[in-house]
Amino acid sequence: RVGRLPQHVTPSWDLKTLWVLNDKGNSLTRIDPQTGKPLGSVRVRDPYNMYYTPDGQYAVVVAEQRERLEFYHAESMKLAHELWVPCKGIDHMDFSADGRYLIASCEFGEAVIKVDVAEQKYLARLAIFPAGMPQDVKASPDGKVFYVADMHANGVHLIDGDKFQQIGFLPTGKGAHGLYVSRDSRVLYVSNREEGSISKIDLAKRALIGKWQLPGGGSPDMGGVSADGKVLWLSGRYNSEVYAIDTTNGHLLARIPVGHGPHGLCVYPQPGRYSLGHTGVFR
């Protein structure tokens, strides 16, 4: 039992803790990943999402309704700095390869923003096209481009993070939402929530290479790839279920009934030296 409206399950930077982000409960529940038992909670306002700076010094709470990034000391979880940003509905983000900056999506602002991580300072705002409702953000394995899923534009925007310019758009499917990199870093999986499908993007070519349709439909949302890379796990947001998908051929391996409104599914443990947060972004 956790707080009100848990949104995501987030691995800590040091991989020792799983945090449940209780958005309407204004709290974070600490879970021991080895036992699955709760270890108390921390009071935090509006924790829709949470990330970690690449150096592990800060946990960055994404306060979506309050349009803020809140930097907490990762060890003590005491607030260090609160940054207001001109980003209505800020919710997902990822970091540059060198950790100097982050790119975040503005769900209700038809834009993305850039923030200096070391200075904890807002830098710029970029309107996306076609205009829509940007969601998940994922940096490419080579660090040269940021992919931004968009539910209303029904595809993925490509952003050059260093120049902070949009360099492309790939139409994937209705309700493009979550972004997950294959274990070999060659493919980006895109969950198209409103049409029950998963699109595949070739990361080297920056091109669409296929689409898997869930038999009988569904609402694939957030999740992750198994440690061996063979299974893509996704929550079924509006169908009270979780999907297990074979990454070799897209076949649905399992459709597991769960409670109402499953969202931020975390596949854990995972390969990696440290976690950047969300439902499991590892480096």
Image (cartoon, helix red, strand yellow):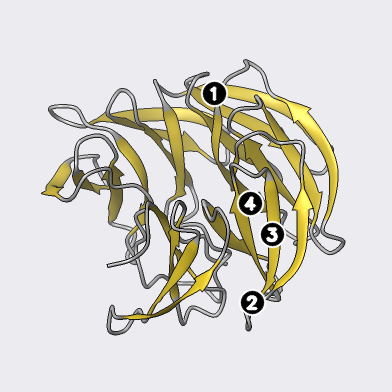
- Category of crowding for the residue at label 2, using alpha-carbon neighbours closer than 10 angstroms: few (below 14), some (14–19), many (at least 20): some
Q: Which residue is mark 3?
A: 70
Q: Is residue 274 above or below residue 117?
A: below
Q: Residue 215 at x, y = what percent?
A: 14, 30
The residue identified by callout 1 is 170
What residue sits 35% from the left and 40% below the top? 221
Quadrant the N terminus occupies: bottom left
The disc, 4 or 2, on the residue closer to the chain's N-terminal end is 2
Horizontal and vertical percent position of residue 13:
57, 74
Amino acid type, label 2: Ala
Secondary structure of the residue carrying numbered label 4: strand
Viewer-side residue, 216 vs 123: 123
Q: What is the x, y in percent for residue 224? A: 37, 54
Left or right of 86 on screen, residue 170: left
Q: Position of residue 104 (x, y in %)?
A: 67, 43
Q: Earlier in the sequence, mark 4 or mark 3?
A: 3
Residue drawn where x is 42% and y is 55% of the image: 8
Which of the two labelled residues, at mark 3 and mark 1, occupies the earlier sequence position? 3
Which disc is residue 94 wearing? 4
Counting residues from the N terminus, which is met first, the one under dot 1 or under dot 4?
Answer: 4
Q: Judge depth for marks 2 and 1 and give the one in front.
A: 2
Distance between the alpha carbons at the discs numbered 4 and 3: 15 Å
Report the Cα–Cα distance between label 2 and label 3: 12 Å
Place residue 267 in its image quadrant: bottom left
**As shown in the figure, which amino acid type bears the numbered disc 1?**
Leu
Q: Are marks 4 and 2 in contact (CB under 8 Å)?
A: no
Name the residue located 60 percent from the left edge and 28 percent from the top edge.
Answer: 108
